[in-house]
Amino acid sequence: MQTPDAGLSLETITVGAGYDPASAGGAAKPPAYLTSTFVYPSAAAAKDLHAAFFDGAATTAKGWIYGRLGHPNLDIVEARLAALDGAEDTACFASGMAAVSAALLALLGPGDTVLMSRPIYGGTDALIGGELPRFGIRGFGFADGCDADAIRRAADEAQAAGPIGLIWIETPANPTAAVVDIALVARIADEIGVATGRRPLVAVDNTFLGPFVQRPLAHGADLVMTSLTKYAGGHSDLLAGGLSGSAALIARLKAFRTLVGSTLDAHSAWLLTRSLETMHLRTERAAANAAAIAGFLADHPKVASVTWLGFLGQGTPARAAFERQASGAGSTFSFRIRGGEAEAFRLLDALQVLKMAVSLGGTETLICHPASTTHYAVPRARREAAGIDDATLRVSVGIEAAADLIADLSRALEAV
Ligand SMILES: *Cc1c(COP(=O)(O)O)cnc(C)c1O
């Protein structure tokens, strides 16, 4: 069995990590263990298993008890993702938002504050702004994630309302591609720790780039959240989320997961394990397609602007942070058509190959109009401040032939 410390490349690790064929009758690939419960071999073994689960190191018993607590497919996918993220351990959840809520609810207490980058995923924003205040937890945002003074100002404001328990950042942001400097945020967390005696944990939503392109733990983050529904699942056929970090932090999150019941199910875990084997190939191909499409759009007279990461201005703090912490520009970006909603809708309705849907990271290219879909519930002023207006379209580029995608866009732009 390949282990994370075997000195192998991520591309090799992702094909085998976490699974030993000898554990399943020599099956070359992991079976899907579609069972909700596990039979104990003896009463004493049952007691040992419970002692191992609830008391940690008390016994060396290995096995499973009940699907919500853990199961073989979960162990395999978590070992694989931990290796990819460069983490001691990973916890997988029934969706990305189940992972986000576990982190926020398990690691924060009444009176704590959350410091966060803006714009941030709508679900995360609604959870922090709409649900956490009932538990006495408040969120404070900063808009320029590469400006130390702006982050420190927001931190001071948060700290005045209560101790900062968690700094939650998303980089690059959706759909504006705003970059947050992970190492800078980690340094500011250290400063807060020195000043207050409590160092906030730094969590990074890494959904847009994933572990082959950006590994936040290596830049000082404590926790990486990934919506595995997107590039990791990669085929738009499952929902899953992951949190990677230190063994102690992940143990706490797994205990919380058992109680709220948001464990990833065996079938999705099995699909995800298979998907991780090709993630690097899919993300490379999609990124190459995205570069070609971004170039085509940037040169088109009916397109006003393109926010593909590869176009970040040379010499800017965002470019420097992007080059330090990411090895590629990913394949989800936005562009603005000349005009407004009417022109955007005419383009969308004329497309034949690109599919009109929310979500991202699948093999197929998806396009949507954020103002009327993903960001429908965000008030116009907040939406526009975040760089999303009626002319903005978001595209998640898939692995089809780039020429077909460009021909479809070209034809549809003629129809606008
Ligand atoms: C989709 C997404 C999430 C939420 O993940 P789900 O799997 O849909 O629950 C969180 N963050 C980002 C950036 C996302 O794109």
Image: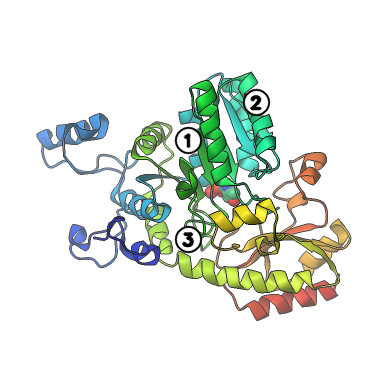
Residue 100 to residue 265: above or below? above
User: Residue 57's x, y, as percent?
Assistant: 21, 34
Cα–Cα gap, marks 3 and 1: 24 Å
The image shows a total of numbered marks equal to 3
Reading the chain from its start, which is encountered first: label 2 or label 3?
Answer: 2
Quarter holding the N terminus is bottom left
Q: Amino acid at mark 3?
A: Phe
Residue 412, numbered circle? none
Which residue is denoted by mark 3 in the rendering?
Answer: 212
Residue at left 70%, top 36%?
Answer: 150
Which residue is denoted by mark 1 in the rendering?
Answer: 102
Q: Amino acid at mark 2?
A: Asp
User: Residue 375's x, y, as percent?
Assistant: 72, 46
Circle 2 packing at 10 Å, graded few (<14), some (14-19), many (20+), is some
Taking the image as shown, residue 122 lies to the left or right of residue 212, namely right
User: Residue 166's x, y, as percent?
Assistant: 53, 32
Taking the image as shown, residue 307 lies to the left or right of residue 95, namely right
